[in-house]
Image (cartoon, rainbow, N blue to C red):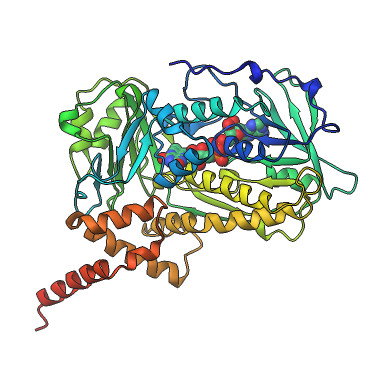
Amino acid sequence: MVISHPSKLTFQIENWSYRNTSQAIVIGGSIAGLLAARVLSNYFERVLILERDRFSANPQPRQGIPQSYHPHVLLIQGQQILEQFFPGLTVQLAEQGALTVDWSADFRWHLGAGWAPRFPSDLMSTACTRNLLEATIRQRLVADPCVEILEAHQVQGLLADASYSQVTGVRVQNAQKQSIELRAQLVVDASGRGSKATKWLSQLGYDAPEEATVKSFLGYSTCWYESLSDEVLNCKMLYLMPKPPYQSRGAVMQKTEQGRWLVNLIGVGKDYPPTDHAGFLDFAQSMHDPIVYESIRDARPLSSIYGYQRTENRCRHYERLDRRPDNFIITGDAVCAFNPVYGQGMTTAARGAIALEQSLRQVQNPQLNLKGFAKRFQKKLAQVNTLPWMMATSDDFRWPDTEGKQPNLTTRLIQNYLVEVQREVPNNKFVFKKLAEVIHLINSPTSLLHPQIIGRILYQKLNLLNKVDFN
Ligand SMILES: Cc1cc2nc3c(=O)[nH]c(=O)nc-3n(C[C@H](O)[C@H](O)[C@H](O)COP(=O)(O)OP(=O)(O)OC[C@H]3O[C@@H](n4cnc5c(N)ncnc54)[C@H](O)[C@@H]3O)c2cc1C
């Protein structure tokens, strides 16, 4: 499959003159960067994305995105936002082989207490490799005449005015190691988990933001398969959940374009899955349900096995900085990166793009005056990130070896309640649907306080009490 790019990927540096036009620069051409650029294209005459990698014509993993070898779930809210920014994207992805997943009919989900019920519903999103998703968004974006991409250029630092109160551009290095200065009215850092924004700000005399990390020491190992038996799997997506506190092993299996399967083994608490084929099979065989092993034991692997262990939740609190320069904002994983097992990263990046759109809409004339905008945006983004952060970290704290600041009492109570809800899922379609809506970020967690759900939980508790012999 070849995704053609207009020749606009060959950007002409000498034509980049910010004195005549309003210009914005985005650092990083992945999901958060592409979506930020989509928003900025509504407000600036030219938007330039700077990316250290080169993009290939075929959607395939690339060096700057080590996670591109691993399955990527697109939550329903993420899908809805992408469709809002790029109308028709869902159909376009389907035309390139992406699958539609009905999250109650096509998804097999083992929650420790048993398999979730399966039934048709309206809980739909697209399933494909993140490589196809990213390439398709990029193709749509560069069709916009005001968006340009400069590949193989690595940003090395920020440029500022004489007082260091405003960022005025970036310093980039090209493949020949030459340094170039590019100016813009607004610079957006979307360079991911490894962002150097903290260092760049300190070079301008600003403090580093407070940082929170929650680490459950979860590891991924992923192998790609040409095809797997539909008879054994009978689904498009499978999640065999590890079960806290002790059943540390699980798996995610995702069917993608061309019928290929990405099989991802998970181990929590440093029980990292191996990256050799024999070890991979042994690990699959050791799980609490045989389905993963049975589906891959005779299958032909298409790839080597890719490991990934940098899975801690990490949040940099830029919104709490007392001092910051204007005209520089940070978004996506560069601000808040999650344990990937919850599948929230791309959707949170999309929520961040909505926050950017809403923040820019409130500025009178963003091309001329962005004073105070950076602070307002980072505060709005922090609000957007709160819910996914709470959901990911509180679940991680169910593991005994998780490191990080313990959640407060309210979060712990919510978490305990969610565990009770999960216990009910195998027996009840209604509970399953309600929980899925919350996980997919299309309904508030308070919707789980539905009388029917509370009633079920109380009924089970009373049943248990009745079985206790008090003598
Ligand atoms: C193993 C794994 C599995 C995941 N699974 C899911 C999932 O199932 N669902 C989901 O929604 N999310 C998932 N995520 C998260 C998801 O990949 C990210 O949240 C999403 O890609 C958004 O990240 P981003 O665009 O902010 O950063 P990234 O995707 O990390 O992209 C950063 C970009 O910036 C470029 N860059 C970096 N530094 C520079 C520089 N100095 N100059 C120029 N360019 C630079 C990089 O090359 C890269 O292109 C997963 C993550 C991991 C690690």
Q: Horizontally, is 140 left or right of 181 in the view?
A: left
Q: Which image quadrant for residue 34? A: top right
Q: Is residue 277 above or below residue 108?
A: above
Query: Depth check: 341 or 443 in front?
Result: 443
Q: Is residue 319 above or below residue 33?
A: below
Q: Which image quadrant for residue 22? A: top right
Position of residue 366 measured from the top left corner of the image (x, y, whole percent): 75, 46
Q: Quadrant of the C terminus?
A: bottom left
Q: Is residue 376 above or below residue 106?
A: below
Q: Horizontally, is 408 left or right of 434 in the view?
A: right
Query: Depth check: 375 or 194 in front?
Result: 375
User: Can residue 332 be seen at all in this image of the molecule?
Assistant: yes
Which residue is painted at 43% across and 27% down in the image? 92
Which residue is painted at 23% across and 52% down in the image? 112
Which residue is painted at 36% across and 47% down in the image? 268
Q: Quadrant of the N terminus?
A: top left
User: Can residue 63 be seen at all in this image of the molecule?
Assistant: no
Position of residue 350 measured from the top left corner of the image (x, y, whole percent): 52, 44
Farthest bottom residue? 471
Q: Is residue 337 above or below residue 282?
A: below
Which residue is painted at 19% across and 52% down in the image? 114
Query: Depth check: 379 or 238 in front?
Result: 379
Position of residue 56 measured from the top left corner of the image (x, y, whole percent): 53, 18
Q: Which image quadrant for residue 285? A: top left
